[in-house]
Image (spheres, rainbow, N blue to C red):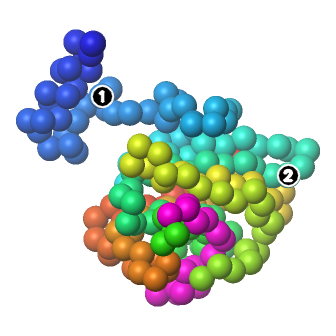
Amino acid sequence: MATPFKLLCFLFALTSSTSLLPSSCAQTCSGYTFSDNKVFSSCTDLPHLGASLYYDRDASANTVSVAFKAPQTSTGWVAWGLNPNATKMVGSQAIVAFLHSNGSMMAYPTQLDSYAPSMAPAALSFPVNDVSAEYVNKEMIIFATLGLVGGGTKFNQVWQEGSTVLNDVPKAHSTRGDNIKSLGTIDFQ
């Protein structure tokens, strides 16, 4: 049975704009349990697209293991990445995930070299390993381990979602609303 607080949040959401939903009703990343019981020491709720980033930094190996999670339909795609040189999408080194036409989740690194990138698999300017993805409860989750550029911990990040994958290639995302606001910085301290 729902607690009175959860019931109140549900009723408020039904009768109000979701942008007016009290922050105390918002789901936080710290309450999420991964299906394979993976655990991350840190997480942050990203400010747009309902996305969250989970991470563990290994200072001795100069790597960070991440899980990026965002709501998505089975016909869409999600992506998350770092931009070592700028605060925008162009120049980002990303990992994209979607449900392949064969029914399995597909995840791979790609370079966002223009405002109309190919979204084809490509090597990144920093090491990336253990790339995988899953689709659970209408959310796509990307897992990867990244080598941290230049030994730093603070980076520009971008994240995105699109509604269409055609012939196993993610198509352009919306250029309005939260889609153009999905960028910021992350410090893997």
How far apart are the two marked residues, 2 and 1, measured between alpha carbons?
36 Å
**Residue shown at 34% from the left, 69% from the top:** 163
Q: Which residue is mark 2?
A: 62
Residue 14: image location, x then y, percent: 12, 36
Are there few (<14), some (14-19), or many (20+) residues within 10 Å of tag 2? some
Residue on which disc 1 sits:
25
Q: Residue at x 37, y 73 (%)?
A: 164
Query: Is 31 displayed left or right of 58 in the figure?
Result: left
- Image position of 136 with respect to 99: above or below: above
Magenta extent: 103-119
Split into 4 quadrants, where in the image is the C terminus? top right
Residue at 91% across, 44% down: 60
| Residue type of the residue flagged with mark 1 | Cys
Q: Position of residue 103 (x, y in %)?
A: 50, 64
Under tag 2, what secondary structure? Answer: loop
Residue depicted at 56% across the width and 47% down the height: 53
Instruction: Find residue 76 and report its image quarter.
Output: bottom left
